[in-house]
Amino acid sequence: MDCGLCNKKPAKVELKYLGKTICNSCFIRITKRRISKNIRVNKLVEKGDKIAVAVSGGKDSVLTLRVLAERCKKLEVPLVALYVDRGDEFAKKCGNIAEKVAKALGVKFYNLSFKKELGVSMADIIKITGKIGANRCSVCGVFRRRVLDRKARELGCNKLATGHNLTDEAQSALMNFVKGELKNFSHFGAISPKSGFVRRIKPLREVPEEEARKYVELKKWDHIPLPCPCRIGSLRFNFMSYLEDIKQVRPGAEFAICKIGDELAKVSEKKLNGAAKKCTKCGELTSREVCRVCEYLTFK
């Protein structure tokens, strides 16, 4: 069967939500165009910016770093890569890949760690999760966000890019729907609002996870192909399965869910006025009286 777009090359990639199967060349072209449009329309990269990229060594962060390295070079926007080592063997392997990719692109690389920045080891995270009945992914995520935000501010960055793709966003929306947490939509979307925190940007926000994976594989770019083991058993891990079931019935569900999420983000931002405060314990920026990091560290 020929490509459903160019009608010249063999069809290789099925896009069910479009009702087409296309060739690898067309897939690369339309995916790159979709990412570029997201960056342009939502003003994710502008002259005068200094951008940090959170790199994990996985497919999404590698794709994000490569896309932004090209874009920032054209606009003469400074770019740095931040990696956070949580202190286990899997993390070390990821860090090696992340550093290799950054150096190949000529991007300044910073290898940060929970131990150095927060005095926390993987053993501490396991201990904390056991005491509070949470999963490692939640606690690790809170610590990681603190380290990234702090370092980005220290380096004078006004934006922090993450590798969140369309599937990640749809999963987050579903989780917030089910938990009834409107406030969590205040940072939903391709770019977070101005609130005191370094603004988050998501260049891959319009790209489904399987397409991000396919893109990186076709380009033969170095990356860690395995998901983080901390995700297993997390609430997000369960919602991954729910979303896959929904997509079997409605292939374009991720786009539709995120569209509704964007509308709720407007309501959330207006209603909650998400300006950051200072934690009463550590003085770091937070949306609460006592930040999650300080809360978790009491169980160390």
Image (spheres, rainbow, N blue to C red):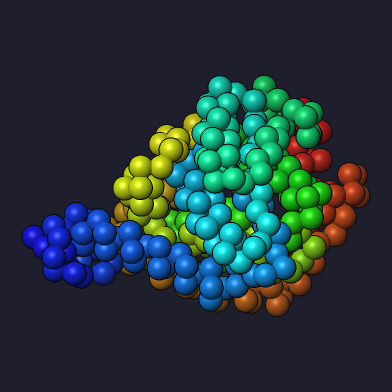
Q: Is residue 33 above or below residue 157?
A: below
* Position of residue 291 in the picture relative to residue 109 (left or right): right
Return the x and y of residue 61 as percentages of the image width and height. 52, 47
Q: Quadrant of residue 51?
A: bottom right
Q: Nearer the viewer, residue 65 or 19?
A: 65
Q: Residue at x 45, y 44 (%)?
A: 59
Q: Residue at x 52, y 58 (%)?
A: 70
Q: Nearer the viewer, residue 269 or 76?
A: 76
Q: Residue at x 47, y 72 (%)?
A: 37
Q: Is residue 94 above or below residue 292?
A: above
Q: Is residue 100 above or below residue 211?
A: above
Q: Quick one: quadrant of the C terminus?
A: top right
Q: Nearer the viewer, residue 14 or 26?
A: 26
Q: Nearer the viewer, residue 112 or 108?
A: 108
Return the x and y of residue 229 as percentages of the image width and height. 49, 31
Residue 14 seen in this snapshot: no
* Position of residue 267 in the picture relative to residue 9 (left or right): right
Return the x and y of residue 54 as percentages of the image width and height. 61, 47
Q: Quick one: quadrant of the N terminus?
A: bottom left
* Position of residue 224 in the picture relative to residue 187 (left or right): left
Q: Residue at x 81, y 40 (%)?
A: 294
Residue 7 seen in this snapshot: yes
Return the x and y of residue 110 as percentages of the image width and height. 69, 39
